[in-house]
Image (cartoon, rainbow, N blue to C red):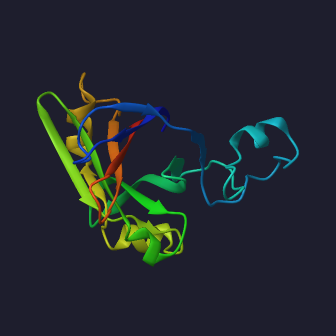
Amino acid sequence: MGSDSIECVSSIDGMDEEDTALTQSSKPHGGAAPPAGIASSTSVHELLECPVCANSMYPPIHQVFNCFGQSFCLHFEAFQLGMAPVYMAFLRFMGDENDARNFSYSLEVGANGRKQTWEGTPRSIRDSHRKVRDSHDGLIIQRNMALFFSGGERKELKLRVTGRIWKEQQNSDAAVCMPNLCS
């Protein structure tokens, strides 16, 4: 899953589209060990290394974003929900659970005049991806809908996942960070 861009939108209500550039780390990463035969000092390994956790990219796929001076990890993976193949995307905050509650996010996937949206609070990175996945706390896309959203002859998976991250604030200076993601 690659990243097109990340934009930060600032406004009083947090939903206007006044765009400001935002830095990001677009290196994907995962928690698995590298396959046998790949030395950790190779240039390929360095290209796939996450600057936050120093893990390399292996499925499931993660993407790290920097919004509001904090790091967030987008997680995307395929798995079986009962007998049905599904895809799931969710966001984790690189910090503890109490700090994660200061933020909210939404993820959206869609095409052909249809869309599916998820909104929630990011989980702490201290919660494993398996714990979050097993609690179904994220955007779950059934395979048939994913293929429908992919268009074409429903044979190739081509999802465009977009999202927003916003900070829950007491005052009127709300801000929204909008990552645009593809898989």
Q: Residue furthest bottom?
A: 98
- What residue is at 50 percent from the left and 37 percent from the top? 22
The one of 131 and 108 positioned closer to us in this rendering: 108
Q: Is residue 54 above or below residue 11?
A: below
**Residue 142 locus on image (x, y percent):** 24, 50
The one of 58 and 107 positioned closer to us in this rendering: 107
Q: Is residue 6 above or below residue 152?
A: below
**Residue 94 locus on image (x, y percent):** 54, 64
**Residue 72 locus on image (x, y percent):** 50, 56
Q: Is residue 67 above or below residue 110?
A: below
**Residue 133 locus on image (x, y percent):** 38, 67
Q: Is residue 162 above or below residue 78?
A: above
How many tags in the picture?
0
Residue 44 falls in image quadrant: top right
The one of 155 and 77 positioned closer to us in this rendering: 77
Quadrant of the snapshot with the C terminus: top left
Residue 138 falls in image quadrant: bottom left
Q: Residue furthest left?
A: 113
Residue 114 falls in image quadrant: top left
The one of 36 and 49 positioned closer to us in this rendering: 49
Left or right: residue 137 versus residue 46 is left
Q: Residue furthest top?
A: 152
- What residue is at 83 percent from the left and 48 percent from the top? 37
Residue 183 in sight: no
- What residue is at 28 percent from the left and 55 percent from the top? 139
- What residue is at 34 percent from the left and 53 percent from the top? 166
Residue 141 in sight: yes
Left or right: residue 134 versus residue 57 is left
Left or right: residue 136 versus residue 20 is left
